[in-house]
Image (cartoon, rainbow, N blue to C red):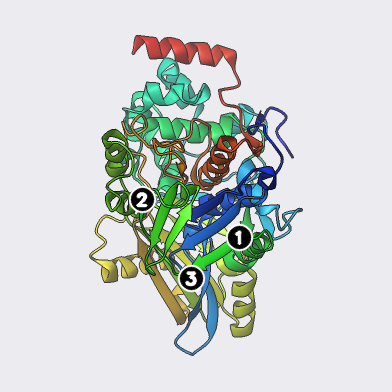
Amino acid sequence: MIDLRRVTHPGPRGVPNANSLARRPHVVVVGAGIAGLAAATGLAERGVSVEILERQAYLGGRVGGWTERLGDGAEVANNRGFHAFFRQYYNLRTLLRRTDPGLERLRAVEDYPLVDAQGRRDTFRGLPKTPPWNALVFALRSPTFRMRDLVRLNAGAAAPLAAVSVPETYEQLDDVDAETFLRDINFPVAARHLAFEVFARSFFARPERLSAAELATMFHIYFLGSSEGLVFDVAGSNFSTALWDPLGQYLIEHGVRLRTEVTAESISIGGSRLLQVHDGSGTTVDADGVVLATDVGALQRIVAASPGLGDDRWRTRVARLQTAPPFAVQRLWLDAPVESDRPAFLGTGGLEPVDNISVVSSYESEAAQWARAHHGSVVEVHSYSVADPQRVPDLRQRMLARLHQLYPETADAGIVGETLLVRDDCPLFNPGSFADRPTVHTPVDGLVLAGDGIRIDLPVALMERAATTGWSAANRLLAGWGVGGHTLHTVPVQGRSPVLRRLASREGRVS
């Protein structure tokens, strides 16, 4: 379904194609993750000459896929773990429709239960789609939330959850951390850990390190701001085959030059066009525009190596960006199946170091094929916000022990293959960082930013923020050349209830 109250954000007007310009612009896109691919698509479809630099051998960035070789010599598909493609990810889904109009390479996950250390279990199955009934039914049927808890909520302090307005919510709540905010509104502790903490960990940060504004916006996107429901889709095969290899071919057909295993080292102003990109191969590329669609660390490295790029204030804003704590993804190829009723995805609360478990062989075709051939299963265990990444062997054993506790049948299974990825390249949305976060626009003519860590004043998050900033980066460059851009869509930019919006506004003035 499509939410009838979703908001349309028209792209800039202009000529339909860059071929009508006196000179065809050339743009270098640094990074072939979701943001970079969206930007490249938006530009190439309007006739702009595009060149992509990607440091990995594959496309998709943190949602990329590749092959591994197990100890027995078998080649298997692998990636950095489970990703949920929610129905309200309009701009990401628009990108995927370029090569999969019916989104047939995605498949629905009807439920993703949550369980805590006390064995309490929440489910999203069968919830109404219409706000606020979706959130109310979820809360009232939860074993961690009772009617008396609803009565005890501090309604005034909680109003921003139901009355999100971007960017006003950030001005109101960004200086508060999510843990403090939930405590101040008297949100029950058990429900806080089982429900909100699971969502907070989607940002790879513990609630005490996550902005309350980010939490409130997330609540708006997934609960009270959208009637798309809480059902999501997953890729039906490894990300490379389901998503990015087809999109890469689509871009090549539109004249895009894809250069993988190449890093951008620095950017300078000048040359035969407007900017020059200096890459790790020693090549200098002249460009009319550059899209920096990298992770935080690479963005900071490139800006630091480009002393003439931007003013001091902007460079400081980039330098102040922070990276979330490391996360770990353990993938196991087991010689025995898990029980048939295991969910594709299980979220956990209070069961450290594990945050969720995925039975990959229940939804990903390559994993399912391997499982059938070996009468086994492929399982992933995720640990977000790793406290001590130096103790990886200990972390591995603890993750494995928790899997055996939650899925006892895996304790007797042999491990045919195993990978453990520990990465620390996700942006941190720490309290007080929103106002200073760099935006798509920069003070450098022809230079724009994109990525899930880049500020955009729309209600988007995670993969959808990456896609939205990518399309927006393309639109900004296109507008500068007088070329028409691309229309974007989001959930409503403010809470649906005028009463709650007024209450939240009054609470903000009192605070």
Q: Position of residue 367 (x, y in %)?
A: 59, 73
Q: Residue at x 37, y 25 (%)?
A: 173
Q: Mark 2 points at which residue?
A: 268
Query: Residue 405: which numbered mark, if any?
Result: none
The residue lying at 44 percent from left, 87 percent from top is 71
Q: Which residue is drawn at 50% across and 72% down?
A: 409
Separation (CA) of disc 1 from disc 3? 17 Å
Number of numbered markers: 3
Density class for disc 2 (Cα within 10 Å; few <14, some 14-19, many ≥20) is some
Sequence-first tag of 1 and 3: 3
Tell me residue 511's x, y (percent).
33, 13
Q: Distance between the residues labelled 1 and 2?
A: 22 Å
Q: Which of marks 1 and 2 is nearer the N terminus?
A: 1
Quickly name the residue at label 1: 256
- The residue at the point 74 percent across, 40 percent down is 1
* Nearer the camera: disc 1 or disc 2: 2
Residue ID for mark 3? 57
Where disc 3 sits, the SS reads loop
Amino acid type, label 1: Val
Element carrying mark 2: strand
Q: Which of marks 3 and 2 is nearer the N terminus?
A: 3
In this view, 402 is above or below 159: below
